[in-house]
Amino acid sequence: MKKVMIISLILPFVILATSCNQSTCDRSSSTNQKLVSEVMTKEVQDATAPDKVLDDLMEGNDRYVKDSLTQRDFPAQVKATATGQYPKAVILGCIDSRVPVELVFDQGVGDLFVVRVAGNVEDKDVLGSIEYSMGVAGSKLLMVLGHESCGAVKSAVDKLDVGSENVTHLLDQIEPAILEVEGTRDSKNKEYLTEVIKTNVKMTIDDIRNRSSIIKQLEADGKIMIVGAYYDLHSGKVTLLK
Ligand SMILES: [Zn+2]
């Protein structure tokens, strides 16, 4: 009798522990599939046109939105990239924790150079990083990625002053985009804020072209492509800016 009672008490917990919802089951069964261990090689990098790299990133974002990320063998990719890297693209994005760049584009180890700075603005160090990525390491696409409700842009719009010359220096770089957009200067004005965020992306691209002869020449020669994009925090979707 005592034994029966113990079993009937334990059984529900056993069932609970071994059961899973549909998405968990899908995930665990997918780990039994062959994991992707291939990485970018020089041959693949050389042979891939800039517009194909863009297609690849946008398809990756589609998988991210649909929660069907590629299952990767990360230890194998780490090993395969230890002696060299041939990333397909460089992304200049914000530091925002809600925009995890490799995940957003479903990319693996060695696929992307990622430059992250609050408000995705450029300075000499950022320009040097982009020039290295494209001029030396052969990446084919530069994407400047802004995002919804960017805290850096909000702070610049509201003229945040925390008594730090470093923060002020950073926010000052967003000021030209603010001055470019008409409307009531208030970060709570969502339409205005979004327009400033998108304008900031476009002006960052203009500045990169104007301040880097290397990037400008690579683009003029058709060897690289530069695009601006906007990330929606609610959906995870990346939209290209015209
Ligand atoms: Zn941001």
Image (cartoon, rainbow, N blue to C red):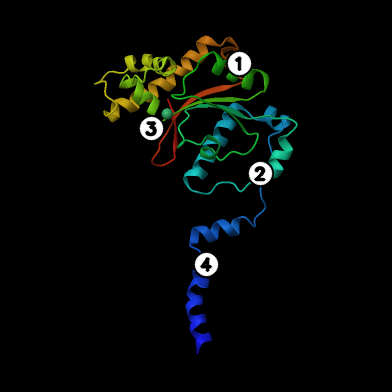
Alpha carbon distance from label 2 to label 1: 32 Å
- List the single residue furthest toward the front: 2
If you read the primary sequence from the N terminus, does the residue marked by circle 3 or circle 4 appear first? 4
Q: Secondary structure at mark 4?
A: helix
- On the image, numbered disc 2 is attached to which residue? 74
Given contact means CB atoms under 8 Å apart, are the residues at marks 3 and 2 in contact?
no
Residue on which the image places disc 4: 17
Q: Are marks 4 and 1 in contact (CB under 8 Å)?
A: no
Q: Say whether disc 2 or disc 1 marks the residue closer to the N-terminus.
A: 2
The type of residue carrying mark 2 is Phe
Disc 4 residue type? Ala
User: Helix, strand or loop at disc 3?
Assistant: loop
Which quarter of the figure is the C terminus placed in? top left
Q: Amino acid at mark 3?
A: Glu
Q: Are marks 4 and 2 in contact (CB under 8 Å)?
A: no
Residue 148: mark: 3
Q: Is 128 above or below relative to 11? A: above
Mark closest to the chain's N terminus, 4 or 2: 4
Residue 111 percent across, percent down from the top left: 63, 34
